[in-house]
Amino acid sequence: MTRNNPLKKIYVKELPPEQSPYKVDDDVYKRFDQRNNLTVGRPTWDEGVKAFTKKTISTRVKKIGEGQPGFGVEDYSLFEAGGVTTFRLETAINHANRGFTSWATLGNKLPTGAEKWSGSPQKATQMVKRVARYFGAELVGIAPLDRRWIFSHAFWTDGKHKQIVFDAVDAPIENEDQMVIPENMQWVIVMAAPMDPEIIQYTPSPLGCAETRITYSRMGLLVGREGVAHRINAPAVALHARMTVEDFSQTDLSYAPPFGPTWDPCLTAANQLLKVL
């Protein structure tokens, strides 16, 4: 089956490095503090923004009561369900070194006697791109790291606020005050997750925002974390067995803290989906 790719309609003009489409005035530019981000930071400390966020529930109740299309209970349920994976697994929206975006190793080790993979940069690049697309990336590329695009400070909704620095370390480190990136880190893997243009056009309704939240959840599969592959097995088996959403919501998945929560994100998503169907 041919996959519909709306990105193919975009005209892309390749420019050599010396003909950059924009110029940055380094005398003016400074790295952005994530604490000032409207999604992650400001709602926790900016009184002007908090005045609006405090009205979230009352606004929802009012919209639902008015019967306005796109603002019904089912629409808000879809919005909440879209963020189940990313919020339940602590990644949230752009939380550094949390959940799916953890800096920790997956813990996988080579079997005794097996040789570590080695190959040319070209072969490694091809492998990374194929795997990224396998996990759902629409676009993927490898580019030199430009430190100007790294936040000056990381911020989390629990109030933690840490400076991001580069230093001579062997691996990324997070301590009480700083997020430390290895000085010799030179390259980044850039991945783009697709969004449904038909749904996103309903923004700022719950439907359009649901697409944003589900995309953040999908992004978790691109960067991955220990145990993610095993969680995918559950819905994969359900699909193979032709289970209904209600059947799947009643399945008894393993409960083994801290590896398996009481309510697995897959079951939570299924229960939220039942409210929409």
Image: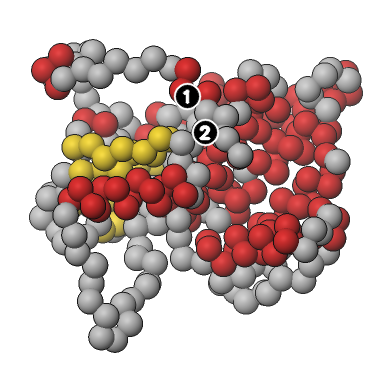
Sort mark 2 into few (<14), some (14-19) or many (20+) by Cα contacts within 10 Å: some
User: Which residue was labeled with disc 2?
Assistant: 194
Please identify the quadrant where the C terminus is shown.
Answer: top right
Label drawn at residue 146:
none
In this orientation, which residue lies closer to the viewer: 200 or 152? 200
Q: How is the image coloured?
A: secondary structure
- Calculate the distance from the C-alpha at mark 1 to the C-alpha at mark 2: 9 Å
Q: Is residue 91 above or below residue 254?
A: above
Where residue 146 sits in the image (x, y, percent)?
Answer: 20, 33
Q: Earlier in the sequence, mark 1 or mark 2?
A: 1
Please identify the quadrant where the N terminus is shown.
Answer: top right
Where residue 250 sits in the image (x, y, percent)?
Answer: 83, 64
Q: Amino acid at mark 2?
A: Pro
Relative horizontal placement of residue 112, taking residue 95 as reference (left or right): left
Residue at 51% in and 66% down: 227
Residues at badges 1 and 2 in contact (C-beta under 8 Å)?
Answer: yes
Residue at 26% in and 58% down: 173
Q: Is residue 161 above or below residue 65?
A: below
Residue at 72% in and 61% down: 240
Count of labels shown? 2
When asked about the image quadrant of residue 64, the answer is top right
Residue at 37% in and 73% down: 108
User: Which residue was labeled with disc 1?
Assistant: 7
In this orientation, which residue lies closer to the viewer: 230 or 23? 230
Relative horizontal placement of residue 107, taking residue 113 as reference (left or right): right
Where residue 88 sits in the image (x, y, percent)?
Answer: 60, 54
For mark 2, give the secondary structure: loop
Q: Amino acid at mark 1?
A: Leu
Which circle, 1 or 2, is nearer the viewer?
A: 1
For mark 1, give the secondary structure: helix
Where residue 131 sits in the image (x, y, percent)?
Answer: 40, 52
